Image: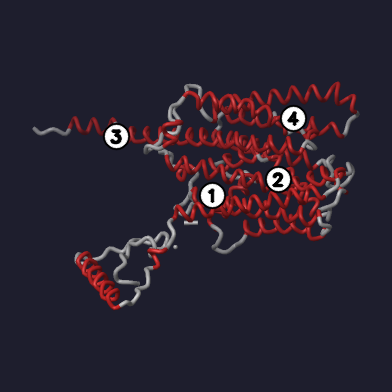
């Protein structure tokens, strides 16, 4: 989708290209191959007797796939060690009073893409587990035959794992050695490369998958059509990436106003400062997108549960904007009035979202079996029908829902290490959520298919009457 001698079989994996069909020879191919092998051995023996060396076949000296995989992993670890060593030495060159501000700025530029890389890795794991089970995720997401497999997802994640930290290492090294202008160009070039890869119009870099992703994003931003499962599935994932979108907005704002590798943006009244109104607006956008999708669904199908779902997303709005008021009201008023309201709205949003995850998105009220693997595997023994899986997912989902509400607070954005950790945990929570949500959708599709088959098998009343009257005299 998205790599002769007559003695070598045409079905050899070293000669057949990826996706090509194996060539079927005629009935006498086996005898011809056996005869060719005998002639080849006879030629080798003759050349050995004459002292002439025969060149070794290219296929016989090719390293095994396991060896290549281990070699790539070793190179990845060596590269990671070099990046960590260079980054650490660069940070230690900075003065102590500027070091924290320096790291804060570097995290704001690179943590969005680092977290996106983490999400891509986990999405590959999701697809890998689905491929082992009986869940036809391609049918659920309405994917064509050229959709990316988990191996190709991991290949993309590997390149992201190499490129993003490499750019961050270059930024730290150049900035610490006084090359400020070159350091400022590193995040700009990285973000420009990401945009170019996404919108590149030619049939490379998985064009169909990129187009599918961008089309789904467009449907999320403008829900002017019937909402499909991929639409609200990706929109739900974006709610977990709202902090990523907020940092992305701040990074792009600095790049546009040429504030990269400076400390001007730390001022509260600066265009891209920490008190900017754009921060809560970007944080709330994914929840508004999901809210509008629910309203559109209610317009199309008229189910009241969609209104209750819309109410769930609306509870995130007070959490975000009440928190942002800390920078625009007196401290006493914030402590005595707005902070209690913020805490109340946070608890309401966390509990409501947790309830909806368990009873609606996952439908675990009756503890249904998950991960129905189609063939034996290690995961089938660890996960299939295990009670500890349900207890772990339900308990961790409740805890991480509460911590995610903490992260949504705009007045806590300066604790960048804590916020980065909480965002990574939220991405992990969403990674768990995907398993249950996709399987629940697959169970619904399977039950509908079974009902339709049953309805087609039951004869109509008119057919029964015609059959009863059709008798011989």
Residue in view at x 52 percent, y 54 percent: 71
Mark 1 and mark 2: Cα distance apart in space: 19 Å
> Which of the two labelled residues, at mark 2 and mark 4, occupies the earlier sequence position?
2
What secondary structure is found at the residue carrying circle 4? helix
> Which of the two labelled residues, at mark 4 and mark 3, occupies the earlier sequence position?
4
Neighbour class for label 2 at 10 Å: few (<14), some, many (≥20)? many
Q: Is residue 226 among the parts visible in the rendering?
A: no
Quarter location, residue 334 = top right
Mark 3 and mark 1: Cα distance apart in space: 44 Å
> Where does the image place residue 340, in percent across and percent down from the top left?
79, 21
Drawn side of residue 209 relative to residue 331, left or right: left
Closer to the eye: label 3 or 2: 2
Mark 3 and mark 2: Cα distance apart in space: 56 Å
Q: Which residue is mark 2?
A: 111
Q: Which residue is mark 1?
A: 154
Residue in view at x 70 percent, y 55 percent: 167
Mark 4 and mark 3: Cα distance apart in space: 53 Å
């Amino acid at each position: 989708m998205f790599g002769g001698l007559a003695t070598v079989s045409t079905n050899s994996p070293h000669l057949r290209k990826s996706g090509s069909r194996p060539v079927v020879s005629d009935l006498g191919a086996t005898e011809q191959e056996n005869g060719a092998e005998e002639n080849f051995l006879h030629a080798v023996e003759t050349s050995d007797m004459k002292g002439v060396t025969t060149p070794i076949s290219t296929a016989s000296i090719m390293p095994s796939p396991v060896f290549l995989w281990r070699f790539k992993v070793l190179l990845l670890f060596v590269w990671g060690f070099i990046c960590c060593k260079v980054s650490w030495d660069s940070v230690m060159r900075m003065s102590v009073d500027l070091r924290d501000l320096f790291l804060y700025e570097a995290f704001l530029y690179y943590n969005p893409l680092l977290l996106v890389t983490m999400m891509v890795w986990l999405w590959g794991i999701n697809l890998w587990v689905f491929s082992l089970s009986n869940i036809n995720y391609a049918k659920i997401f309405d994917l064509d035959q050229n959709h990316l497999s988990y191996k190709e997802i991991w290949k993309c994640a590997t390149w992201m794992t190499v490129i993003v930290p490499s750019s961050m290492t270059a930024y730290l090294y150049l900035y610490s050695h006084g090359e400020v202008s070159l350091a400022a160009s590193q995040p700009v070039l990285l973000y420009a490369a990401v945009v170019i890869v996404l919108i590149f119009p030619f049939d490379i870099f998985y064009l169909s998958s990129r187009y599918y992703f961008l089309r789904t994003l467009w449907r999320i931003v403008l829900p002017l059509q019937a909402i499909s499962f991929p639409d609200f599935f990706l929109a739900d994932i974006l709610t977990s990436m709202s902090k990523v979108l907020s940092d992305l907005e701040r990074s792009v704002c600095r790049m546009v106003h040429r504030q990269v590798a400076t400390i001007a943006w730390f001022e509260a009244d600066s265009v891209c400062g920490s008190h900017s109104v754009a921060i809560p607006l970007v944080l709330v956008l994914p929840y508004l997108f999901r809210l509008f999708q629910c309203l559109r669904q209610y317009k199309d199908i008229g189910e009241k549960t969609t209104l209750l779902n819309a109410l769930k997303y609306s509870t995130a709005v007070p959490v975000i904007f009440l928190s942002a008021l800390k920078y625009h009201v007196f401290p006493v008023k914030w402590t005595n009035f707005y902070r209690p309201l913020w805490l109340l709205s946070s608890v309401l949003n966390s509990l409501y979202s947790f309830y909806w995850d368990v009873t609606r998105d996952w439908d675990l009220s009756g503890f249904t079996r998950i991960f129905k693997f189609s063939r034996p595997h290690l995961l089938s023994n660890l996960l299939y029908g295990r009670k500890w899986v349900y207890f772990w997912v339900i308990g961790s989902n409740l805890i991480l829902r509460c911590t995610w509400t903490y992260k949504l607070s705009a007045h806590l954005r300066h604790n960048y290490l804590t916020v980065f950790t909480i965002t990574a945990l939220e991405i992990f929570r969403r990674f768990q959520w995907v398993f249950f949500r996709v399987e629940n959708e697959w169970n619904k599709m399977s039950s509908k298919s079974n009902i339709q088959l049953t309805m087609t098998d039951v004869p109509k009343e008119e057919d029964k009457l015609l059959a009863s009257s059709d008798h011989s005299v």
